[in-house]
Image (cartoon, rainbow, N blue to C red):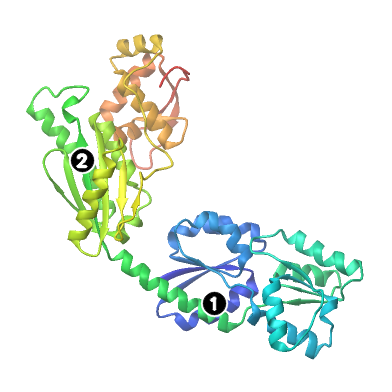
Amino acid sequence: MIKVGIVGPKDSVDAMVAVGREFSDHILLTSFIYQGVEQVPTYVAENDMETDIWFFSGVAPYSMAKAHIGKKKAFYPQVNSSVLTKVLLELVYRDGLSLDRVSFDTISEAHFRETLEELGLHCENPYLMPYKEFRQRSELVAYHTRLIQESKVDACVTGTLFVTEELKRQGIRVYRMGFTRFIFREIFKQILQEGETLHFKRSQIAVQLIEVTDMEKLENEPANAYELRRLDLKLQELVLDYTESISGSFVAVGNSKFIIFSTRGSFEENPEFHPTILLEKIKLLTNSHANMGIGFGVTALSAERNAQLALGHAKNHRDAAILVDHDGSIEGPLRQTNSITYEYWTQDKEISENLKKAGVSITTFNKIISVQKALGQKYISASMIAEWMGMTPRNARRILSDLAEHNIIELIGEETPTNRGRPRKIYRILPSPQTT
């Protein structure tokens, strides 16, 4: 089933849904009715992940939403000659109005002239306000009312519900250009075709190659083979958690290389665990750099070739993920809104001395700062540190306690856990402009 989000005013949405029911075997509709077009960005932003394709009632809501759609397909009907024909027939043949005394918005002059020619009508100097992008509703209302007040027109034609209702409220004669069922039906047919393409893409094979470099240059050298093995298991656990999130399977190729198999659909529908988050966690765990190559393909062989090509490009960067699509197009380095960056040193001598007293390395402290930044909040807890840095909660609590004891961070409160257990202590890193 193709999940289609329908956005528009109530009358348009009702008409779109009525036609959409004809395609209910393949399309699942969700309606978003707005009172004002300024609500559209919120609707789209909050529901984009649950929607495959967007269907807007016109150019106005589409223009408001397109910045929030990303790569998803969006459709909207455009006011053209066929839409205008019905209104012109009502104006001229039913109501006997002169087109020279009517103002129009939305429609382009080319479509206007073409339609008049086909209907055998004439208008020397039409009052037109065409637009391809969103215009403020007040601007459209002002355009029509000004012409009415100047006695240049006797009636108005608009493609916007709000303008229709506002002009009616002012007692102005107004006609609404509405889209026909035929137009909606043709768009739903296009949506079906796009849905087939979408299904084809989702069923493609996705291969991800991960390579961790410089693991021999760990900050704290493993004391023995057991420690090295524990680190390897923790690394595999990170990869396993990520693989589970995309319903895939992985194979370890040596101690620092992994290959993950999944489908493109499960990979792209996993926004909560972005590939760069995995690379950041690997970096925090191992103090090493990691790169990822992602390849899509119709077959496992073509996907793996693309992943190898992507990994080759990723190695030109540091801690990067590169994607090669089934058609050979390259995307990347992929970015996450919040990313981890940290240094192995600090210019603040006082903090450096206090860290030595606390028995916490500069790198570990800088990692904690980076985790807090990545989480986008002004506090940190032991559970957060443990999850991101691949250590036990007990060890994380000890580190935070030592930092607080030496006035590097401060205890600011406690939060009640969702399950049974003692309250978790919340810390804030004390500001220091020199700390990196």
Q: Which residue is drawn at 81% across and 80% down?
A: 99
Category of crowding for the residue at label 1, using alpha-carbon neighbours closer than 10 angstroms: few (below 14), some (14–19), many (at least 20)? some
Rendered location of residue 206, percent (x, y): 25, 57
Question: In front: 399, or 264?
Answer: 264
Q: Which residue is drawn at 35% across and 27% down?
A: 342
Task: Decide: is 259 above or below 432.
Answer: below
Rendered location of residue 415, percent (x, y): 43, 34
As measured in the structure, the alpha-carbon distance from the residue carrying label 1 to the one carrying label 2 is: 49 Å
Rendered location of residue 320, percent (x, y): 31, 40
Q: Residue at x 82, y 74 (%)?
A: 125
Q: How many marks?
A: 2
Numbered circle sitting on residue 359: none
Question: In front: 265, or 226?
Answer: 265
Direction left: furthest residue: 225
| Label 1: element kind | helix
Q: Which of marks 1 and 2 is nearer the N terminus?
A: 1
Task: Decide: is 252 above or below 428.
Answer: below
Question: In front: 283, or 201?
Answer: 201
In the picture provided, is 382 more to the left or to the right than 219?
right
Asked whether disc 1 touches disc 2, contact meaning CB atoms under 8 Å apart, the reply is: no
Q: In which quarter of the image is the C terminus?
A: top left
Quarter location, residue 113: bottom right
In the picture provided, is 319 more to the left or to the right than 46?
left
Q: Is residue 424 visible?
A: no
Reading the image, the residue beneath label 1 is 17
| Label 2: element kind | strand
Question: In front: 326, or 282?
Answer: 326
Reading the image, the residue beneath label 2 is 211
Q: In which quarter of the image is the N terminus?
A: bottom left
Label 1 amino acid? Answer: Val
Q: Give the number of the mark in front: 1 or 2.
A: 2
Category of crowding for the residue at label 2, using alpha-carbon neighbours closer than 10 angstroms: few (below 14), some (14–19), many (at least 20)? many
